[in-house]
Image (cartoon, rainbow, N blue to C red):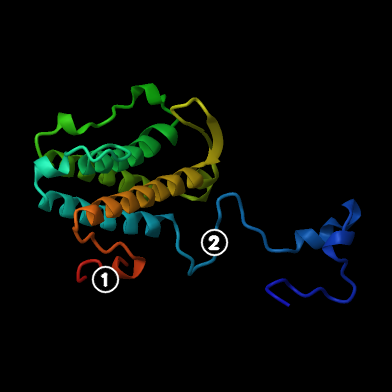
Amino acid sequence: MGDYPRRRRNEPSIGSINQNEGWWLAKQPVLSPAHEYPYGLIDIRALNGYSSRVRRKFLTKISSLGWEEAVRNREASHYSLVGIMLHMIGNEEWILNFVIPGRPSTERKKHLPEEFAGFDGVEALLAEVEAKTELYLGSVDARELARSVKFTLSSGTVFDMTVEECLFQTFTEQLYHMGEMIALFWQDDVEPPRMQWFYNRESLSLSV
């Protein structure tokens, strides 16, 4: 019968419910706007931790290629491997420091490879952004996650999203571009870092 709950004999079917039968719907389990999941399901903090660990592995791999090779124009979304990495870092910075607090994106500074002399500056930027993210995630609660914010794209398109959705958006943004970098590594016969979850769980991240 699938995963649907069985009705008791005297309970109406969903199709027969009307305004006077809302009592049945009220008894059904629903997710709150903040997605207060039961214990045991993976949450935003776990996803962020995974993303951070894998992103650092990718930066280490990029660094092993040397600066000139890493900033070479590959006609990718942000041209070079360093450009893609800076976009990933900048996206997290933008969502955490501008979208969620409601600051205008016009104040945002985009990071470009030509502004950096080498990998030390990129690593310092990553450490700064991740420290702010960790500080925020350490204090966030269900009410904050459910708060509605305006998510405005560079095209001017505006989405009404919860804070939790914004945090999930920055996580998925990392995944898109990790996949892009994997393809670029393969083009040059470079083995990409392992990005699968089972290689990057927090309990294993220091030993794998």
Q: Earlier in the sequence, mark 2 or mark 1?
A: 2
Reply above or below: 103 against 175: above
* Residue found at x 32% / y 52%: 178
Q: Residue furthest top?
A: 106
Quadrant of the image occupied by residue 192: bottom left
Q: Nearer the viewer, residue 152 or 145?
A: 152
Q: Is residue 61 left or right of residue 204?
A: left
Relative to 143, residue 99 above or below: above
Q: Residue at x 29, y 53 (%)?
A: 183
Residue neighbourhood size for the residue with mark 1, other residues' Cα within 10 Å, grouped as few (<14), some (14–19), many (≥20): few
Residue type, mark 1 in image: Leu
Q: Tell me the quadrant of the picture where the N terminus can be found.
A: bottom right
Q: CA distance from mark 2 to mark 1?
A: 24 Å
Figure check: 157 above or below 171: above
**Label drawn at residue 37:** 2
Mark 1 secondary-structure assignment:
loop
**Percent x, y for residue 172?**
42, 50
Which is nearer the eye, 92 or 19? 92
Q: Could you say where residue 141 lies in the image, as x and y percent from the top left?
A: 47, 50
**Residue 75 point in image, percent of width and height:** 27, 38
To which quarter of the image does residue 125 belong?
top left
Residue 138 seen anywhere in this rendered image of the structure: no
Q: Residue at x 54, y 39 (%)?
A: 161
Residue 208 image position (x, y, % from top left):
21, 70
Q: Which residue is mark 1?
A: 204
- Identified at 35% across, 66% down, the residue is 197
Secondary structure at badge 2 equals: loop
Classify residue 40 as left or right of residue 180. Answer: right
